[in-house]
Image: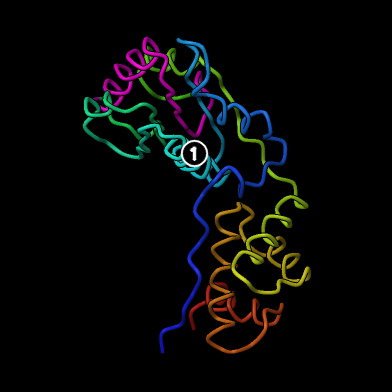
Amino acid sequence: MLLDFQPAPVPSLVNFVVGRNQELIDALRTLPLAEQGAASLYVWGESGSGKTHLLKAATALYLSRGLNAAYVEEATDWSRLSAYDAVAVDNVQNLDEDSQVGLFNLFNEFRDAGRPLIVAGRDAPQALEVRPDLRTRLGWGLVYQVQALSDDEKSQALQRHANERGFRLPQEVIDYLLAHVRRDLPTLMGVLDSLDKWSLTAKKPVTVSLLKQLLQPASSPTQ
């Protein structure tokens, strides 16, 4: 029997757990209104910190405002992006030499036209292993590090995610997740989604006992 699982919420600036990142959120909202030559933003942080969520959320926001916006996460035809009003480029550290040249040219073009360009990477601009000229461009505009969430903020995020999916999440389940699972939010959300699906299949409530059963196969050594 196919179960009617609710899809994961679409990334937005509303469902991002802000924590200490309010200034970054405000900058993303107002970037299209920036003065000409000041419409670029570079965001960096460790894997799982929420950079991809923010870039997809900003792209969706700009589309809702009538801008022709695009999200890019891999090598592409950079010349075609010249037609867009706003572009968000993810994982800049993974771009090959040709793509770095393409992004460098796009950066210059968007800066001259005053169009929003958002780029995300793992490291601060000066620590990126990319072309020196591109590294310099990335540091020209606004630069923000995504600040990690506290345990309380992660707890709030998990509780809100559970509410959006329509199931009750006891605090003791959250506490166990934070103590026994990788602590980045995407991993925690993924385990929570799996727990929700398993509870529906087994027709059992979400409990610590059920979570332990879910985690047991991955943590037990092969006999």
Q: Where is residue 116 in the image (x, y as percent from the top left)?
A: 44, 23
- 66 lies left or right of 160: left
Residue at the image position 68 percent from the left and 65 percent from the top: 177
Looking at numbered disc 1 in the image, what kind of residue is underneath it?
Leu
Residue at the image position 35 percent from the left and 18 percent from the top: 131
Number of numbered callouts drawn: 1
Give the residues drawn in magenta, as a range.
98-126
Q: Nearer the viewer, residue 205 or 9?
A: 9
Q: Is residue 88 above or below residue 220?
A: above
- 80 lies left or right of 27: left
Q: Where, by quadrant of the figure, is residue 87 drawn?
A: top left
Q: Which of 79 and 114 is in front in this view?
A: 114
Q: Position of residue 157 (x, y in %)?
A: 68, 55
**Residue, disc 1:** 61
Q: Which of 2 and 124 is in front in this view?
A: 2
Residue at the image position 58 percent from the left and 78 percent from the top: 214
- 214 lies left or right of 74: right
Q: Residue furthest front?
A: 66
Q: Where is residue 88 in the image (x, y as percent from the top left)?
A: 41, 32
Q: Where is residue 212 in the image (x, y as percent from the top left)?
A: 65, 78
